[in-house]
């Protein structure tokens, strides 16, 4: 009888550990990112003051990257390809939350790209970003054209839901901002460092 108890306890510990690892590495990243308690939504079409944020007065593509977030590493190849394909049409920047993240970002994306440190979170707040990875597209007039996710698939393998790329193509072709489903605009992934999050989720458009 005692043997069965020990076996039961051992199996419970094993399955409990497996469940914890699965939650930590997989399930929690498939849920909407908790919204910061002081979050202020920024709507598509809202003006973004590029000069105050240290950005050029041109069409912009911003990738918000956090090397501590596993989700930020899943689609790095897709982002490199995006920038190679459309970097002549928009000014592209990799945005990191802290100066010490620049080393990891340059290792991930290469020294040839442009990087910015989001000092005190000013840029993320201006664009309504509170998680990573997130893409932001700003048009020539300095208005928010798109903010959201890259793809329904973690590794950006579902071409029909390449949200950031489709938004970029719309901008380049002079079209209106595309209208996507909820998955494109509701934040998933990791909370940005230093954000005070609540337990609620929020639809962002």
Image (tube, rainbow, N blue to C red):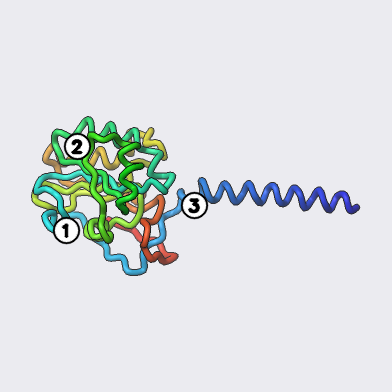
Give coordinates of residue 152: x percent, y percent.
Answer: 38, 42
Q: How far apart are the two marked residues, 2 and 3, measured between alpha carbons? A: 31 Å
Residue at numbered disc 1: 46
Q: Is residue 151 above or below residue 53?
A: above
Residue at numbered disc 2: 169
Q: How far apart are the two marked residues, 1 and 3, measured between alpha carbons? A: 31 Å
Label 1 element class: loop
First along the sequence among labels 2 and 3: 3
Q: How far apart are the two marked residues, 2 and 1, measured between alpha carbons? A: 20 Å
Q: Is residue 197 left or right of residue 118?
A: right
Label 3 element class: helix
First along the sequence among labels 1 and 3: 3
Give coordinates of residue 70: x percent, y percent.
Answer: 44, 44
Residue at numbered disc 3: 28
- The residue lying at 13 percent from left, 44 percent from top is 59
Q: Is residue 103 above or below residue 128?
A: above
Q: Which image quadrant: the C terminus?
A: bottom left
Give coordinates of residue 137: x percent, y percent.
Answer: 20, 46
Q: Is residue 127 above or below residue 177?
A: below
Q: Is residue 51 left or right of residue 33?
A: left
Tell me the mark number nearer the camera, choosing from 2 and 3.
Answer: 3
Q: Is residue 72 left or right of residue 123?
A: right
First along the sequence among labels 2 and 1: 1
């Amino acid at each position: 009888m005692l043997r069965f108890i020990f076996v039961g306890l051992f199996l419970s510990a094993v399955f409990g550990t497996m469940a914890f690892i699965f939650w930590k590495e997989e399930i929690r990243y498939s849920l909407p990112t908790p919204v910061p308690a002081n979050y202020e939504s920024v709507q598509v079409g809202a003006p973004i003051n590029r000069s105050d944020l240290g950005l050029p007065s041109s069409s912009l593509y911003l990738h918000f990257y956090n090397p501590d977030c596993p989700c930020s590493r899943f689609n790095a190849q897709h982002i490199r390809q995006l920038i190679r394909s459309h970097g002549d049409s928009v000014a592209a920047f990799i945005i990191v939350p802290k100066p010490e993240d620049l080393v990891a970002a340059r290792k991930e994306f290469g020294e040839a790209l442009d990087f910015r440190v989001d000092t005190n979170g000013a840029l993320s707040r201006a664009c309504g970003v509170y998680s990573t990875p997130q893409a932001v597209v700003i048009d020539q007039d300095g208005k928010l054209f798109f903010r959201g996710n890259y793809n329904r698939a973690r590794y950006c393998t579902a071409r029909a839901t390449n949200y950031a790329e489709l938004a970029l193509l719309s901008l380049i072709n002079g079209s209106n901002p595309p209208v996507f489903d909820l998955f494109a605009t509701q934040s998933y992934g990791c909370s940005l460092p230093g954000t005070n999050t609540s337990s609620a989720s929020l639809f962002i458009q």
